[in-house]
Amino acid sequence: MSFSAYNATDLAKVLKQRESVAFHDGVLEEGVIEMCAAYGAKDSGDARQALDLLLESGDIARERNADHVAEEYVAQARERLQTDQVIEGIINYSYHGQLVLWALTLLQEQGKTPSRTREIREPYEMLCEREGNDPVSDRAVREYLAELETLGIIKSAEINRGKSGGKFKKTRIESVDLERESRS
């Protein structure tokens, strides 16, 4: 069974129905439901995600001992939820995919990113040896990098230097301030 994505108007209706169950009257400032609905529609059209955003906004307001849930908390909640999704994605990612990401992390810590796939290969193979595993093929490493990019964990730029230099990708880790997020 397949459900079509909700638009912002539909999501706002769903959130308004849940408002009285989750919040006391007058706690949500004007625009909070609409902002959650807009982000929900933009990101996925999923009512559960929009509701999670609204509830997380309320949690942030409570953590700050605020009397009202403001739009600024919605933006903070969105960042927190996106960070949680990235962390969950990494935890559930395949073992070799994690090793490829770890190798890229090592290069980034050394200031050697963006890096070509062949530059990622050396620290990846070192990690495989250290962990007692055989490395996967170059093609599999490229596929892991493509999946990590799809997940929004890394960014790649394709470089084309023509006939003499060839075509390749340079990859870096997408910035996520996990330390800041853990303090929020």
Image: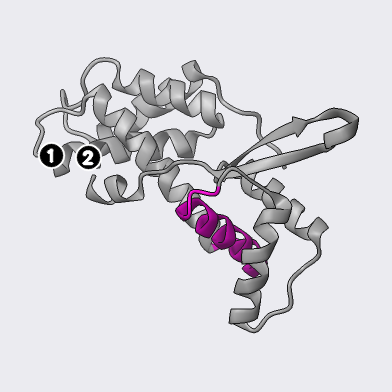
On-image quarter of the N terminus: top right
Secondary element under disc 2, as helix, strand or loop, is: helix
Q: Disc 2 marks which residue?
A: 60
| Residue 110 belongs to magenta span | yes
Name the quarter where the C terminus is drawn: top left
Q: Who's the residue at 53% across and 30% down the image? A: 43
Can residue 19 be seen here?
Answer: no
The label on residue 160 is none
Relative to 102, is 14 above or below?
A: above
Query: Badge 1: how crowded within 10 Å, few (<14), some, or many (20+)?
Result: few
Residue 151: name its quadrant.
top right
Residue 24 in sight: yes
Residue with the mark numbered 1? 64
In the image, residue 155 above or below residue 104:
above
**How is colour applied across the structure in the image?**
one colour
Residue at 51%, 41% (x, y): give it.
Answer: 174
Residue 138, percent from left and from top = 80, 59
In x, y percent, where is residue 41?
52, 24
- At 57% from the left edge and 41% from the top edge, which residue is drawn? 152
Query: In the drawing, does residue 17 fall left or right of residue 121?
Result: left
Q: Are marks 2 and 1 in contact (CB under 8 Å)?
A: yes
